[in-house]
Amino acid sequence: MTDYVHARHLSAGGAPPIIETERKRSRSIIDTDALGSVMRGPGLTHDRQRSLEQASVPVLIMCLAQITGDSRWLEDPYLPKRDISIFADPSGGLDPVVQSAVREAMAQVLDELDSGQRVLPPLPDPSTLVKMMSVCLGEKVPPEYAEMAMEEMGYRERGLNWPQAAQAVAESFRVLVIGAGFSGIATGRELKRLGLNVDIVEKLQDLGGVWLENDYPEAGVDTPNHFYSFSFAPNLDWSSNYSKRAEVWAYQKQVFEQSGLAPHTEFGVEVVAMRWSEPDAVWCVTCRDQAGAENERRYHAVITASGNLNIPKLANIQGIDSFPGPAWHSARWRHDVDLRGKRVAVIGTGASAMQFLRTIAGEAAHVTIFQRLAQWARPPQDYHGTTTVESRWLLKHVPYYYAWYRFGLMWRFGDGLLPTVRRDPAWPHTDRAMNSRNDKQRIQLTEYLLGELAGRPDLIEKCLPDYPPYGKRILIDNGWYQTLRRDNVSLITEAVDSIAGSRIMTASGEAHEADVLIFATGFEPARMLASVDIRGRSGVPLAKVWANDDPRAFLGVTVPDYPNLFIISGPNTGLAHGGSVLFVTECQVRYIMAMLQTLAKRGASSLEVRRDVHDHYNQRVDAEHAELVWAHPGMTNWYRNASGRVFSPMPWRLVDYWHMTREVNEADFHFSSEA
């Protein structure tokens, strides 16, 4: 059986060579020798049939339409029913007889491909692709998604090519990347591919960023793996639908090594200061090693890829220093502390607590959780599910199956959710939901909560949020509700007033004894880059420009007065309604490369976004957020600062941001020292 993910050059219309190169280099994180022997040895027909039985029928239909070029697969009776649920029905709502016909047709097509009777045709043009996407989803997909989808599905390389005429610039242009997490890896890979001189510095002792630091029990993704991965580096061997930290980190390491970034990377080096030297048009960067020694380096451009979820937020509680036992933030987990027989206090009920609670509750004598605001949590469904031999076989051996499977995830976990968080002026129940669809989500989430906490009205009252779904990040229930029912778990909704020795005191004066204190209080995203003294053209610290927890940037990437400084995961580029942060990272990397390319083409030494362009963009961001759930009155979240401005989430659809970062509008920038 041919591995069609690695064999798309059977036709002249296969995937772009650079994508093929990456895929041929891609090796499984998991040992798949057994998988290969099972699927290629005796019993192939039986094993293939078993795999097809587990396949998504809408995805198979798209594969048949693309492989055969036969338009009948895009017509009745092969039209999947519209399904707006997060997890699509694999049957597509089709009659069982039709489903069987689809599987039989695919089995025949695979036989023809293996025997050489059929070859893969050229990739569909954008208009055909839009029609196919619409049929796959059972709803109309706007044409504006075609080009973006081709990149996400691996049909087209997202990156740029460096202009041959500016090759001399590439050889002398030095770029520093700060951080070796997902963003740093993607940025470094692209700079290296373009032939620029790139250095990567990482303050930690290894790569990974948040996936290295956040190693608390059961830390993992809450976006499906096949979407939470780079478009240029598919992993067909994820062991789970939602992998835990170790496997995500292994994926990062794999991409890092395959991209050849090790010779360009220094670990244990922290950037502490940067100042722009106008006469030389360079950034003078002060770096500090683990021994405390500092040195200055000079770069033509600096790209910060350190993220905004790397400064732990500690609760400001009176008497916190008096606590005699071990105390730590979830992002700095103490694996040396044995929780068995201990009384553990957990302050905070966000994403990390949702993941680690059931583990520590199974170890500790008692766990007391202090909750400031209840969280919406959706059913786990396939959250704990492992991938099967059959599902991995489909991704590897059915042409285009991976592409269409990823497209479905992109749609359901992306822009398909944004309308649910937009305010409907005609909707009367603004306290509970943003619109009727948002209200349906509320009803579904409430029904799930009531079922999990049946017979515990005390917990229902404490756990049922009084704000619209998505007002805070929606979590996946990792046994949270069932853990709250345990005899050794208490949920306290009173505010913590102070700490007096081993006693956690609430506002009413009630004391809760604890031997261990864990803060699950999140991070300080508004303080992004706060650990670096960055001074631009005028010498003003960036921290001063971004004072009062109010960071702003054009497209979240670049700031006036700071030429040739580019930011990954900057202000208003987070995803709170859905999507994959890696999608945004790839968009930003492309845009930064386009800016560097523009510099080279113009023979300029620096570029700086115009202030009026920057300000107008942020006015648009604020106006858009005024209509979205994160600005909903009567609640607080970490997306907003003290003045109420939403500074973290992106208000745009994914496709909007993709178009915004597709090309550089040179009129948006000032260029200096042009040739």
Image: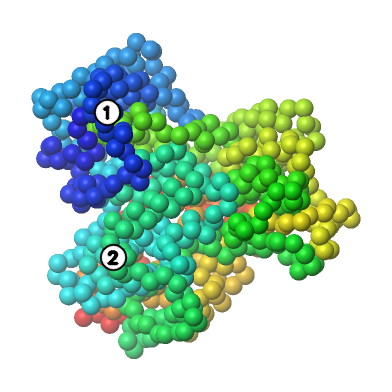
User: What residue sits right under mark 2 in the picture?
Assistant: 191
Left or right: 627 in relation to 47: right
Q: Is the residue 82 above or below the residue 505 in the image?
A: above
**x, y (%) of residue 486?**
74, 36
Q: Which mark is residue 39?
A: 1
Q: Residue at the right extreme?
A: 509
- The amino acid at mark 1 is Met
**x, y (%) of residue 411?**
41, 38
Left or right: 555 in relation to 514: left
Q: CA distance from mark 1 to mark 2?
A: 39 Å
How many discs appear?
Answer: 2
Q: Residue at the top extreme?
A: 97
Position of the N terminus by quadrant: top left
Q: Nearer the viewer, mark 1 or mark 2?
A: 1
Position of the C terminus by quadrant: bottom left
**x, y (%) of residue 83?**
45, 26
**x, y (%) of residue 252?**
39, 54
Marks 1 and 2, the one that precedes in the sequence: 1
Q: Residue 563 is drawn in which quadrant?
A: bottom left
Residue 167 is at least partly visible in this image: yes
Residue found 59% across the figure and 36% down from its top: 378
Please state which of residues 296 and 569 is positioned toward the viewer in this rendering.
296
Q: Is the residue 400 above or below the residue 298 in the image?
A: above
Task: Give the SS element for disc 2.
Answer: helix
Q: Which mark is residue 339?
A: none
Residue found 76% across the figure and 51% down from its top: 343
- The amino acid at mark 2 is Leu
Q: Residue 234 is drawn in which quadrant?
A: top left
Please state which of residues 6 and 45 is positioned toward the viewer in this rendering.
45
Q: Is the residue 607 above or below the residue 523 in the image?
A: below
Residue found 59% across the figure and 61% down from its top: 332
